[in-house]
Image (tube, rainbow, N blue to C red):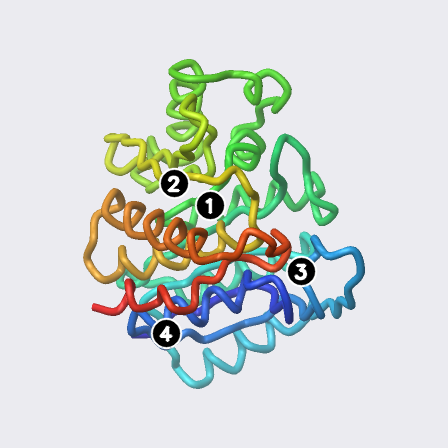
Amino acid sequence: MKVAAINDLSGFGKCSLVADMTVLSAMGFQCCPLPTAVLSAQTGYSSYYSKDLTGIIPEYTREWEKQSETFDGIITGFMMSNVQALNSLDFIKEFKTSGTTVLVDPVMGDDGRTYTNFSADLLQTIREMTKEADIITPNLTELILLADESPENIMKLKGEDLISEISKLSMAVGGDRGKIVAVTGIPLEESDEVGNFILENGVSKIISSKSNKVHYSGTGDLFAAVFLGAYISGKSAFDAADLASRFIYSSIIDTPTDTSPNAGVEYEKNLKMLIS
C-alpha cells in the first residue's frame, strides 16, 4: 500500500516528512515523499536555511501520472505558499480515487496566531483542499480559521463551552458532509491532560492523554501520520486517534526533560507500537 506525502523536509525537528516517512513505513506503507521545501531545521529554531521547492509538485504529478501510479492514501502538511496549495489541490484531484483516503492537515497557525506562510489566498485554497479530503486534522486555531471565525473569543472558552463550540465548528468545516474531523491539542480543564476532539459520521468523542504541558515540534505531524495509517488499516477514527495519542505520550515520556521542544520527541523506539 502506498501513501503520497506532501510536506516539508527538515533536517532537525523530527517533523513533517521525517514523521510521515518513519511512521508510515513502520505501519507497513510505502511512503512516497513530495517535498514542498527543504530546511536545515524546522522554523522554530533561531536560525535555519530554507529552500522553497515551489514548482516541483506539478513535475511530480506529471511523472507519477505517466507511471500510472495509484495511492491508497494522500497526506498533506506545510505549504510554503498559496501556489503550493493550489498545486497540491491539483495533485489530490489527479490521484484521488474511490480507494484513496485523503488527509489534509491545514497548517496555518497555533495558539491563536497565524504562521508566516499564512495569507487569505492560502486559507481559501486550503478550504478547497478540505472539500476533497476524507480526514481533516486542524488544531484549534486552524479549525477557527477554516470556519471563518475569530480566534479571540473562542480561544478564551473552557470546559464544556469550548467543546460545544469545537463540535459546532467541526460540523461546519466538513463534519456535516461526512468528513472525519480530528481537532488536536485541545487544553482540558484537567491540568495534566490534552484532548483530541474526533468527529466521525456525526458521532463525536474526546480522546485524551496525559500531558507535560511542553509544546514539542512535530507532534501534530506524528498524530496525522499515525491517524491516517491506522484508519487505512481498518481502525475507526476513534481507535486511530487513541493509538496516535498513546504513541505520542509514550514518546514524550521517553524524551529527556532537558531536550529542547524544538528538537521534537524521542519517538523512534516507540515505532514498535505501530507495527501490526
Q: CA distance from mark 1 to mark 3?
A: 25 Å
94 vs 2, left or right, is right
Foreground pick, 76 / 226: 226
Where in the figure is residue 95, as x and y percent of width and height?
41, 67
**Vertical relation: 5 (above or below) 132:** below
Sooner in the amino-acid sequence: mark 3 or mark 2: 3
The alpha-carbon separation of the residues under discs 3 and 4 comes to 22 Å
Q: CA distance from mark 2 to mark 4?
A: 22 Å
Q: Nearer the viewer, mark 1 or mark 3?
A: 3
> Nearer the viewer's eye, disc 2 or disc 1?
2
Residue 182 tag number: 2
Earlier-in-chain disc, 2 versus 4: 4
Determine the CA span between mark 2 and mark 1: 12 Å
Quick one: label 3, few (<14), some, or many (20+) residues within 10 Å? many
SS of the residue under disc 2: strand
190 horizontally vs 97: left or right: right
The image quadrant of residue 124 is: top right
Between discs 1 and 3, the one toward the N terminus: 3
Q: Which mark is residue 130?
A: 1
Question: In the rendered structure, which amino acid carries the disc numbered 2?
Answer: Ala
| Amino acid type, label 4 | Ser
Q: Earlier in the sequence, mark 2 or mark 1?
A: 1
Do callouts 1 and 4 mark residues in contact (Cβ within 8 Å)?
A: no
In this figure, which residue is indicated by the disc labeled 4?
25
Q: Quadrant of the C terminus?
A: bottom left
Name the foreground residue: 11 vs 142.
11
- For label 3, the residue is 42
Q: Looking at the picture, which amino acid does disc 3 mark?
A: Gln
**Label 2 Cα crowd, 10 Å radius (few <14 / some 14-19 / many 20+):** many
Position of residue 92 in the picture relative to residue 60 (left or right): left
In the figure, is residue 253 to the left or right of 177? right
